[in-house]
Every structure is written in structure tokens, then in C-alpha cells.
Image (cartoon, rainbow, N blue to C red):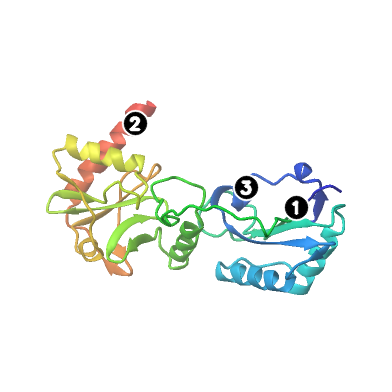
Amino acid sequence: MKTLGYYNGKIGEIEEIQVPMNDRACFFGDGVYDATITANHIIFALDDHINRFFSSASLVDIPLPFTKPELGDLLKTLVKKVETPDLFVYWQATRGTASRAHAFPEDAKTNIWAMIRPIVMPDLEKKLQFITTEDTRYFHCNIKTINLLPNVLASEKAKKAGCYEAIFHRGDRVTECTRSNIHILKDGTLHTAPADNLILPGIARSHLIQHCKLLNIPVIEKAFTLDQMMNADEVIMTSSSTFCASADKIDEKPVGGKAEEILKKLRTSLLNEFKEATKI
């Protein structure tokens, strides 16, 4: 073989291997991986890479269907099937194949991928050029990417606690939920986090703001704190499928319930918009 693709026991050239659309890697990036190289079909530092792979899987609660020796034997067998002796060897585990939902699926089995292709070893004597750039890897919440592993883990934590959602915060600043936006009502005013790089600017959030203005409810787009949220008159969650829901408990402590009339006006207004748009 010139290249090798592996998926749950199926082997073929990389372009021949097909992955189910419902593999959680496709929707959430819900998996872990490791990679190394070979020379003369010998995998370099294999034990070190397998140890890290098992550690990564353990940290995100992905059960692996192999022992460390079994995975090592599989990878050694796979590299021998490829003609070229110098190879790039990549493998990953994903949380399984299941209908799209953030929290862990109940019965999904872990999927194991591998990809092996020829590699040309770099010239270590060659001088290289670099640039510097700010590390913003964890500051792109405003982009609706499929890199949702932190959301998945938080959503599962909420599920295990018997809760609907998890509310993220950075220090004392409340940002958003795993799959929705969070807002508060206080003294007749809606407070919502600013549409900066720390939240996804939800479509339902924008409609909530529009309807506040229609109903002459003041809106403040400014960060609010955990303490402000816990002492708000109402805590409101919005998403594309849940236009205007409210909380009655956060971290097992009672919240909200002090501005039901305003909440009802907002909910009715948003539902009327939905009914008119969809001709219900």
C-alpha cells in the first residue's frame, strides 16, 4: 500500500476509508490523537506516544478499546503494510458515533482512526524563519467553530448534575453557556454580555435585544458578574431553539422569579414573531 487509512478495523488507502457523518469528531472535535514517525518501518518513541495518548483519553473520559500493548502491536502491524519505510503515523480516538448532542452519548463505542503516509525527513541543517503572534487559541468564542470539546465536557458535567445547561465564566465575569447565551434582568433592565471575542453572538440573543427595544425595556450590553447573576430579578437563557427560557436554580441556589411580568412579555413577543414567520 502507498498510504494506509484505518477505521475501526477497516483498512485501505486513505482516500478509500469513509467515516460516518455522526462520528463526534465531525461535530465537536470530540477526540484525542497522537502522532510520530517511522524509519525503516520502526515507530520512533512509540511507548512515549502511546502513554500520552492514553493520558489524553483519560482526561476527557474517552474509554479506549485497547490496552497499551495491543495498540502498539496494531500500529506496528499497520506500518508494515505501507511500502515506504519512512512514514508519518497518526492515530486518534473519538467518543463514538451518535446523533448530535453535546453531552456524552449513552451507548456509543469509541472509534479508532489511524492514518499512515510517506514522509520526507527534514534537513536539520537548514536554517528556518519564524514570526511571532499572540496566543489566542482560547479567545475565539465568537466564532461558531466545530472545536467544541470544552463545551461537550461542560455540558456533560451539567447533565450529571441533573441540570439543563452550564454557565461559563472567566474569573468573576459571566460569559455564555455551552450552547446558548445567558442574560439577566435587574430593575427592569436587560443586561447581556457584550458581543466581543468571549461569547458567540447568538441570533436569539439579537432578537431578544430587538424585542426589548420594542417593549421599551432598557438594554445594557456590558459584562456582568457571578454575584450580579445570582442576585438578578431573572436569569434568561436564549438559543435558536429556546427563545427565552429562565432559570430558577444555579449551583443548587434559588435565582430569579422576581420579574415574571417582564419575562412573560418578552417570551410572548418572541413567540409571536416565530409564529408569524413560520405561519403557525
Report the residue marked by disc 1.
120
Q: Is residue 100 above or below residue 45?
A: above
Q: Tell me where residue 98 appears, x and y as whole percent.
A: 61, 52
Give the amino acid type for the residue marked by disc 2 in the picture: Lys
Relative image position of residue 21 (x, y in whole percent) = 64, 44
Determine which quarter of the picture holds residue 36.
bottom right
Work out how far the residue at label 2 is from the one at label 1, CA to CA, in angstroms: 60 Å
Measured in 3D between alpha carbons, the distance from the residue under mark 3 to the one under mark 2, in whole angstroms, is: 31 Å
Callout 1, which amino acid?
Val
Viewer-closest of 214 and 88: 88
- The residue indicated by pointer 2 is 275
Residue plotted at (70% across, 56% down):
123
Foreground: disc 3 or disc 1: 1
Categorize mark 1 by other alpha carbons within 10 Å: few (<14), some (14-19), many (20+): few
Indicate which disc residue 22 carries. 3
Task: Examine the rendering and report whether any part of residue 3 can be seen.
Answer: yes
Residue 114 in picture, x, y percent from top left: 73, 56
